Amino acid sequence: MPLKYFGTDGIRGKAFDTPLTISEVERWGLSWSQAALHHKVHTLILGHDPRVSSEPLIKAFVSGIDPSVRLVYLGMVPTPVLAYETSRTPGAWGVMFSASHNPPQDNGIKSFSSSGEKLEAPIEMEIERYFDSTSVPNKITHCDLPAVQPNEYLNTLEPFTFPDPWRIAIDCAYGAAGLLAQKIFLGETIYWIGTPPDGTQINHQVGCTHLETLRKVILEHHLDFGFAFDGDADRCLFVDSSGEVFDGDQILWLLVKDCINRGKPPAGVVGTVMTNGALEQLICNAGIPFLRTPVGDKFILRAMARYGYPIGAEASGHVIQKYLGPTGDGMATALSVCRILKNMGVEEVFKARFNPYPHRLVSFSTRIKKPIDACASLNEVLQDLSKEYPSLRTVIRWSGTENKLRLMAEATDLPSVNIALDRLQQAALSDLS
């Protein structure tokens, strides 16, 4: 049975619209606490990003929570901070109000298990069942948010001071990383973008989904490189001095090579269906097992846990280093890459990037949404393309957080990619018009 409200990364939508109206979020609070108690979890650790809607929504959530559940409130924090604090608190779940990389008007609810990883699908389904079977609580059990509690996350990271010659830019997306990043990354010449946290501007033309702003600053000021987080700082992407993106696939290969160079090759690596095929080939040629999962860092984490693999990533910038923390962490990623840049040299690292297979991604909104296997024209084109272009790899999926169809094509040559995407898009539009 498919999940009704949970997507690839929790529950997400327009703030104050279904399923995130104030009354519904009160019901989510009650439902989360009922599921928690059923699993003998008696503490919920709460946090949020700086969106304008985050505080009223988390207040509504808290008002619905069963009074026997203990609350720990971290205030405005990056998602990795909440995941870390949850992992070090016995018998706790974490609940984060954030819409990650989405625009300011959106919000969402992410949840973490006592290990600091995303809740398993059966528990998400259980929360949904409680939600559908309950009404707005008759009385408010918690009138106010608890006092903000300090966290220990910063103590786990050693601040990085950039060498004097380096001139860099850091884009915090007006998000939850803004204050913390300035305590971790130190230097004489840092161009800060998207700070301080601002819920009215979070992710708006800034951050790792809008790298054009970071690129412009780098090129205008002739900087050595820069990096950007998203709104809740669980992603990080780099841009070099020429304005070229160093994405999550490139970061993953850099980290894997660093492990190999230190004589500690990882037992295995996890990517997703979107991971570039050239990276998979490099990892396998190095004698390291490689696994693909569906899109979403929660699927990467589950595969890593199942097989005991220590590292995984998405091209979008979710990079998970289990030896550093329980989940994707933009600041830990930035620190790891910066230390390698310092050891190897900035130019040397960016010049040593691998050549990805040509690929393109097309996304578009549609009026109707139906299962991919019910799209007759699309599936017919897929069958034809697999015969005509043996090297072609395609991924077709609905966004887990937006009403968009995403089409990806990858091959060893660009003309095959362009032809395939044009035909797939025409077929999809025909099926969904």
Image (spheres, rainbow, N blue to C red):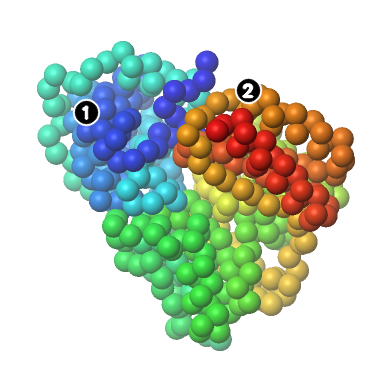
Q: Residue at x 14, y 39 (%)?
A: 144
**Residue 334 falls in image quadrant:** bottom right
Q: Is residue 186 left or right of residue 21?
A: right
Residue under label 1: 23
Graded by Cα atoms within 10 Å as few (under 14), some (14 to 19) or many (20 or more), the crowding at tag 2 reads few
Residue under label 2: 374
SS of the residue under disc 2: helix
- The correct choice, above or below, for 346 with respect to 120 in the image is below
Residue in front for this viewpoint, 433 or 278:
433
Q: Is residue 161 at least partly visible in the picture?
A: no
**Residue 199 falls in image quadrant:** bottom left
**Residue 355 falls in image quadrant:** bottom right
Graded by Cα atoms within 10 Å as few (under 14), some (14 to 19) or many (20 or more), the crowding at tag 1 reads some
- The correct choice, above or below, for 347 with respect to 424 in the image is below
- The answer to which of marks 2 and 1 sits earlier in the sequence is 1
Cα distance in 3D space between marks 2 and 1 = 35 Å
Q: Residue at x 43, y 35 (%)?
A: 10
In the picture, which quadrant includes the C terminus? top right
Residue 131 placed where, x, y %? 32, 20
Q: Residue at x 32, y 48 (%)?
A: 105
Residue in front for this viewpoint, 37 or 285:
285
Residue 307 placed where, x, y %? 69, 33
Residue 314 placed where, x, y %? 61, 48
- The correct choice, above or below, for 173 with respect to 301 in the image is below
Q: Amino acid at mark 2?
A: Ala
Q: Residue at x 70, y 70 (%)?
A: 349
Q: Amino acid at mark 1?
A: Ser
Q: Is residue 327 left or right of residue 242?
A: left
Q: Are marks 2 and 1 in contact (CB under 8 Å)?
A: no
